[in-house]
């Protein structure tokens, strides 16, 4: 199985004042085993800080996964 069949897109969205999330959409073909998909998502969570937001499985077996992570902005401190 080739990893090139995995499709991803990313976008950023503000859900409220001061809170901003980055979303990543994955389209995983049915050819990938359940254990492979689990390992893939665990790896992204541990190393990339992603959290599972949504999983949809289509009639053809394609998995559409949405991951999210909070964007932390550092505030500028001013010296007096």
Image (cartoon, rainbow, N blue to C red):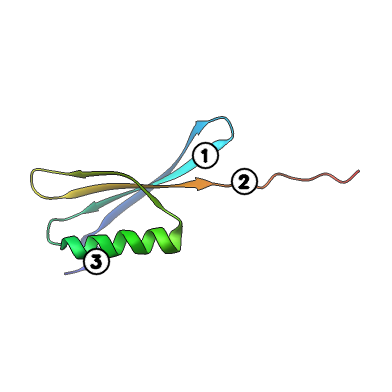
28 versus 39 height, above or below: above
70 versus 43 height, above or below: above
Q: Position of residue 78 (x, y in %)?
A: 83, 44
Upstream in sequence: badge 3 or badge 2: 3
Which residue occupies the extreme left position in the image?
A: 60
Label 2 Cα neighbours within 10 Å, binned few <14 / some 14-19 / many ≥20: few
| Circles 2, 1 touching at the beta carbon (< 8 Å) | yes
In three-dimensional space, the C-alpha distance between marks 2 and 1, rounded to whole angstroms, equals 9 Å
Q: Secondary structure at mark 1?
A: strand
Disc 2 target residue: 73
Q: Residue at x 38, y 60 (%)?
A: 44
Camera-side mark, 3 or 2? 2
What quarter of the picture does the C terminus occupy? top right
Q: Position of residue 39 (x, y in %)?
A: 28, 65
Disc 1 target residue: 20
Camera-side mark, 3 or 1? 1
Disc 3 target residue: 3
60 versus 30 height, above or below: above
Answer with the quarter of the image where residue 2 lies: bottom left
Q: Residue at x 53, y 46 (%)?
A: 71
| Circles 3, 1 touching at the beta carbon (< 8 Å) | no
Upstream in sequence: badge 2 or badge 1: 1
Q: Is residue 72 left or right of residue 76?
A: left
Comparing 7 with 71, the one in front is 71
What quarter of the picture does the N terminus occupy? bottom left
Q: Position of residue 77 (x, y in %)?
A: 78, 45
Q: Is residue 74 left or right of residue 19?
A: right
Q: Residue at x 54, y 36 (%)?
A: 19
Q: Secondary structure at mark 3?
A: helix
Q: Secondary structure at mark 2?
A: loop
């Amino acid at each position: 199985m080739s990893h090139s069949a995995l499709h991803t897109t990313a976008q950023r969205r503000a859900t409220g004042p001061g809170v901003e999330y980055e979303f990543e959409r994955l389209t995983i073909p049915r050819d990938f085993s359940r254990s492979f998909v689990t390992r893939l998502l665990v790896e992204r969570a541990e190393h990339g800080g992603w959290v599972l937001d949504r999983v949809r499985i289509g009639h053809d077996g394609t998995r559409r996964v949405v991951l999210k992570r909070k964007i932390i902005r550092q505030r500028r401190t001013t010296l007096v």
